[in-house]
Image (cartoon, helix red, strand yellow):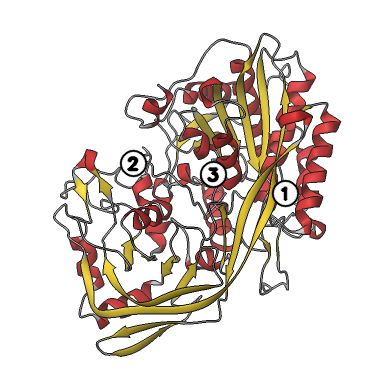
Amino acid sequence: MTLRHYTAAAIVSLALVGCATANPPVVAAAPAPTVQDSAPQADPARMDAIIKTLASDEYEGRAPGTPSETKTIAYLVEQFRKLGLEPGAPNGAWTTEVPLLHTKLDTGVPLQLATGQGAMTLRQGEDVYISTQRNVDRAVVDNAPLVFVGYGVTAPEKGWDDFKGADLKGKIAVFLVNDPDFGLAEGAPNAGLFGGQAMTYYGRWTYKFEEAVRQGAIGALIVHDTPAAGYGWNTIVSPGGENYDLVQGPDGEGRLMIQGWLSSDAAQRVFAAAGLDLAKQAAAARSRNFKPVPLTGETLSASVPVTSETVQSHNVIAKITGTTRPDETISYGAHWDAYGIGATPDARGKKIRAGALDDASGIAAMMEVARMFKSGTPPQRTILFGIWTAEERGLLGSEHFVASNLYPADKMVADITFDTLQPNGKARDFVLIGKGQSTLEGYLAKAAAAQGRTITPDAKPERGLFYRADHFSFAKRGVPSLIVMALGGGVDLVNGGRAAGDKWVSDFTANCYHQPCDDWKADWDLSGAAQDADLGYAIGRELADSDAWPKWKPGSEFASKRK
């Protein structure tokens, strides 16, 4: 599951309905789940073997464009062949090329901030984190003025404009993360306007960078805040100055020269040097009347070496052709990339960020879904299996696939994406990310009930998880989408209950997310991950043998895309 989402299109807000505190089940707690013997079942041992292989040191963290990509793609194609699937790419191929621009900033070069009180040095990795998507030798910013733009939201449908016509050409836009109503008490002005505790797309840092481009800025910095962002500073700096994008042009025109984050402490110093109180400015930014505030007397300069290369990466696509409606498709997805080899070892001396759960576990689940489909009667609709590149670099592989129109979105019944499953045994419930989006939720509830499980809303809607995995590339184009992910709050585990589920989510996101400790572990119990694979299969199987078309629910902006 990605943190780095760089999409070309801006998406209007989406209120994720969820619970901001502990996640209460929608219905009364059920007994320990049981699976009907007649239904195909995912095999935890098979899943474990796939994860163990992909997360091994041999695969070196599966970074796109590295020698480990070649090994990874060969392994995935071989797995599909063994299952008896058909190649899903053009001309009988298993893969499609995805051209990527890979850039890396020199993280040892500090940025210089001129202030009315003298020069201030901003150290990369400590005070500031930046990257670039421009195909340049140096990321150069010369005395660019800083302007605080609040939450940086342009939402005409809500009567909200944080820019008020301000000229940002050649300037650095400084944003707050999340939405203007995040954390507001019930009854406060504008409380709930953008979804309350649930982040909308306006709150995502990807939207803010896109909006900075539209406003003419040369760069953008977002003030980091762990509760509002949904992750700590360690996650921010984990890419080590690297960035990826789909190849856009000769020098990445239409992209920011620098984009990134200010640490909370550094932001307070930067604002104070301009005679401003960050807390007061943040409070003022919650109003429709907010206007951009120049950080008077402050200009940022940087001249940071950049290495760049064009990387030819690959998606892997397989299919089972439908017997009666082959042009109608149901898509399953997961991503093969992880974060490669880090610059510094962790406490155990490990540098390989293996991506065992994120997302070798999703690949394992999808392979089991493919096996279950092949073990039964041929589906009436075509079943697609896509394993995407560069999810961790901005959903780039899935974006490239959907934009290619290889399988038209208006003929796609649904997308089900597996990304980061939990390894702690069976659960009594399923935590739904993006509650209230589409009628796929009814199919999910039915499949879960057959397992003796209930549905629980996402307990962490402020993290905006609905926008941070490959299903979002499909949703943007109107395809009803479901994300099967274990990071929306702890499940009610058969062994340990909700408390154990919550503890695992907290520990994983704080310590192992995109870090070397997301590696394979011998003591995992993948029976719960297998349950989730079974859910995905049951939903797809029902849709595959019917003429039903799931729909977006009223109020979802994706409904207009489907129409």
The answer for how far apart the CA atoms under marks 3 and 2 are is: 17 Å
- Residue carrying label 3: 469
- Residue carrying label 1: 524
Picture coordinates of residue 382, whole percent (x, y): 67, 19
Q: Amino acid at mark 3?
A: Ala
- Residue carrying label 2: 13
Picture coordinates of residue 263, whole percent (x, y): 41, 72
Numbered disc 1: secondary structure = loop
Residue drawn at x 56%, y 58% as measured from the top left: 507
Q: Residue 299, located in which quarter of the rendered image?
A: bottom left
Q: Nearer the viewer, mark 1 or mark 3?
A: 3
Task: Tell me whether circle 1 and circle 2 mark residues in contact (CB < 8 Å).
Answer: no
Residue drawn at x 39%, y 51% as measured from the top left: 207
Picture coordinates of residue 330, whole percent (x, y): 61, 24
Front-lying residue, 244 or 253 = 253
Picture coordinates of residue 542, whole percent (x, y): 60, 16
The answer for how far apart the CA atoms under marks 1 and 2 are is: 38 Å
Numbered disc 2: secondary structure = loop
Judge the density around disc 3: few (<14), some (14-19), many (≥20) Cα neighbours within 10 Å.
many
Q: Residue 218, located in which quarter of the rendered image?
A: bottom left
Judge the density around disc 2: few (<14), some (14-19), many (≥20) Cα neighbours within 10 Å.
many
Judge the density around disc 1: few (<14), some (14-19), many (≥20) Cα neighbours within 10 Å.
few
Residue drawn at x 61%, y 46% as measured from the top left: 420
Of marks 1 and 2, which one's residue comes earlier in the chain? 2
Residue drawn at x 40%, y 45% as measured from the top left: 461
Q: Is residue 85 above or below residue 69?
A: above
Which label belongs to residue 413?
Answer: none
Q: Amino acid at mark 1?
A: Trp
Residue 482 seen in the current view: yes
Front-lying residue, 352 or 292 = 292
Q: Amino acid at mark 2?
A: Ser
Location of the C terminus by quadrant is: top left
